[in-house]
């Protein structure tokens, strides 16, 4: 009997920051999708993908932190990691990117093509964190019947979505303009979902958010 394997990469080193508790949110996600397979939460170090070929779903929950060659290597040292991830994803891999995943792997230009979009420094932003509403589209298994999610979270705005991605969720900024925060991407050869939700564990107290995560992971594994 084959066991479905879900690997959650939790931000560390160059892929963490002082504003996000990646360990806490990664373990919250692990609990939410635990019924879908065997879960492993792993720090985002250079050897984290050495056994990627046996992974059925890769969850990326990291950010952008310090570049410290003495701590976790130079950009060149990470080339093999990014090549392995890109090759696996383009060969049919399933990727779920959460919140800061749009702003991680800044040293890998191809990551945006896999994820289906990215945070753009100097352009993307978010209003102060608060209880927020995220409107969801019909016509896709990830969002059908959900309507909207309300959660205490940041509203990411002005993300850049790749042309081949399909936007399934939006939120409003303080001026009432809609911005994409949830999309699916299959244009790169694999299957990806990106959700901008998940700043901290308070967001995962929302049953709507938890259901959205379960739906996203289930679709990626189907």
Image (cartoon, rainbow, N blue to C red):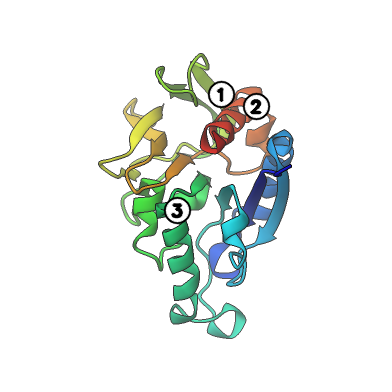
Residue 207 visible in the snapshot: yes
Instruction: State the residue lying farthest toward the left.
Output: 163
At a point 59% along the width and 55% down the height, the residue shown is 19
| Image mark for residue 150 | 1
Give percent across and percent down for residue 198: 58, 40
Question: In the displayed structure, would residue 194 be above or below residue 107?
Answer: above
Question: In the displayed structure, would residue 81 be above or below residue 23?
Answer: below
Q: Is residue 187 left or right of residue 83?
A: left
At a point 61% along the width and 69% down the height, the residue shown is 45
Residue marked by disc 3: 89
| Image mark for residue 206 | 2
Give percent across and percent down for residue 105: 45, 62
Q: Quadrant of residue 216?
A: top right
| Image mark for residue 207 | none
Q: Are marks 1 and 2 in contact (CB under 8 Å)?
A: yes
Quadrant occupied by the C terminus: top right
Q: Is residue 161 left or right of residue 191?
A: left
Give percent across and percent down for residue 126: 43, 42
Label 3: how many residues lie within 10 Å, few (<14), some (14-19) or many (20+)?
many
Q: CA distance from mark 2 to mark 3?
A: 30 Å
At a point 73% along the width and 34% down the height, the residue shown is 35
Mark 2 vs mark 3, foreground winner is 3
């Amino acid at each position: 009997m084959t066991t479905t394997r879900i690997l959650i990469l939790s931000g560390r080193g160059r892929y963490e920051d002082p504003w996000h508790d990646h360990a806490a949110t990664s373990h919250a996600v692990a609990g939410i999708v635990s019924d879908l397979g065997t879960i492993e939460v792993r720090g985002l170090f250079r050897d984290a993908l050495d056994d990627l070929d046996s992974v059925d779903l890769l969850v990326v929950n990291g950010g952008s932190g310090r570049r410290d060659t003495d701590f976790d290597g130079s950009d060149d040292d990470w080339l093999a990691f990014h090549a392995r991830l890109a090759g696996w994803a383009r060969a049919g891999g399933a990727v779920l990117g959460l919140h800061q995943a749009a702003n991680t792997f800044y040293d890998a230009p191809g990551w945006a093509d896999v994820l289906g979009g990215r945070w753009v420094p100097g352009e993307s932003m978010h209003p102060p964190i608060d209880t927020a509403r995220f409107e969801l589209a019909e016509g896709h298994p990830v969002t059908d019947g959900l309507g909207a999610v309300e959660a205490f979270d940041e509203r990411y705005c002005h993300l850049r979505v790749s042309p081949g991605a399909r936007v399934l969720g939006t939120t409003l900024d303080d001026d009432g303009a809609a911005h994409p925060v949830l999309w699916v991407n299959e244009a790169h050869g694999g299957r990806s979902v990106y959700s901008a939700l998940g700043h901290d564990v308070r967001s995962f107290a929302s049953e709507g958010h938890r259901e959205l995560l379960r739906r996203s992971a289930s679709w990626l594994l189907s």
